[in-house]
Image (spheres, rainbow, N blue to C red):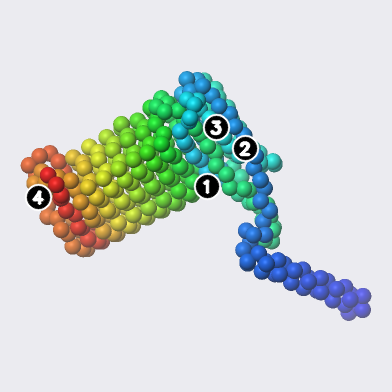
Amino acid sequence: MKKSTKITLIVGSALMAVGLVCGLTAWALAGFRLSNLSTVQPAATVEADYDAADVTSIVVETAADGVRIVPSDDGRIHVAYPQREGDGGYTLTVRDGRLELKQPRRSGSVVWFGFGVELEDADAVVSLPADWAGDVTLDVSVGDVSGRGVSVGGGLTASADGGNVTLQDVAASAISVTLGLGDVEGTGWSVDGAAEVTVDGGDTDLTDVTAASLTCRAELGNVTLERAAAESVAASTDGGDVEVSRLQADRIDLRTDMGDVSGTVDGREADYAVTASTGLGDSSLTSHGGETDRTLTVTTDMGDIDVAFIGG
C-alpha cells in the first residue's frame, strides 16, 4: 500500500474517531436523550372569530397537533391554531356554514443521526358559545383531544389514531369517540341520543354520564362506568376488565373475552331477567327470569363475574 494511501486512511480514521467522541460527548451532555439534541421550531398563533349564526358545523383535522374545545366568553366562535414556517401550514375556510380547519399530514420531527428539527407542541383551540346548535368533528392523527364545559345542539365526534381523548362537562345530541391507541376519560356527559366509545388499545373511564343509549367497545383495555344512566348500556372488551358502579339502565349487556366483570347495578334483582355465563371462572349471578322487561346479560369467556344489585 502506498504511503499516501496509508496516511489518508489514518487521517480519515482519526477524524471519524474524533467525530464519534464529539457526538457521544454531546449525547452525554444531553442526558443520553435524542430529544435534547433537537432544535424546536417555534409556532406562531393565528386567531380568527365568527358570528355563531353564520356557522352550522365545525370540522378540525390535525396531523401532529392536539385539539381543544372550550367555552366562548363573548357568544362568538373563536379559532386559534399554531402556524409554523415551512410546514405547509393550516388552512381555514368557511363555506356554506361549514368551518374547516385542516393541517397537512407531516411527521412531527426530522432527525439526522440524532440531530434534527422538532415541531413545538401546540393545540388548535375552538371556543364555542353556550348552546350553539351545530355539529363538531375533531379528527387528530397523533395528539390529544379535549373538551370542557361546552354544549352543542348537534353531534360531537372525536377521533384520534394515537393520543388521549378527555371530555368533561359536555352536552350534545350525540357523542361518538373513536380511538386507536390511548385512553378515553369522560365526566359529566349529557347526551340526548347515543353515546358511543370505541378504542383499539387503551382504557375507557366514564363517570356521571346520561344518554339514551351508551355503548363502549375496546379491543384491548378496561372499561369502567361509574354512575352511568341510559335506557340501554353495552360495555365489552376482548382483553380487559369491565367494571360498573351504580349503573342505571333497563337493558344491560356486559361482556369480556378475557377478564373480569364486576360492580353494582341500581335496582332490584327480581326486576331483571338475568343471563350470566362464564366459560372459565366464578359467578355471583345465576340466570333467571324477571318481574319486568328489564334485562341483564353478563358474559366472560375467561374470568369472574361479581355483580350485585343495590337500592330498589
Task: Name the residue that disc number 2 marks.
Answer: 45
Task: Name the residue that disc number 4 marks.
Answer: 288
Task: Name the residue that disc number 1 marks.
Answer: 142
Mark 1 Cα shell of 10 Å, populated few (<14), some (14-19), many (≥20): many
Task: Name the residue that disc number 3 marks.
Answer: 79
> Going from the N terminus, do you reach mark 3 or mark 4 first?
3
The CA span between labels 3 and 1 is 20 Å
Label 3 with label 4: CB-CB less than 8 Å: no
Residue projecting furthest to the front? 73
> Going from the N terminus, do you reach mark 3 or mark 2 first?
2
The CA span between labels 4 and 2 is 61 Å
Disc number lying in front (3 or 1): 3
Q: Position of residue 162 (x, y in %)?
A: 48, 49
Depth check: 199 or 301 in front? Answer: 199
Label 3 with label 1: CB-CB less than 8 Å: no
Amino acid type, mark 1: Val
Amino acid type, mark 2: Thr
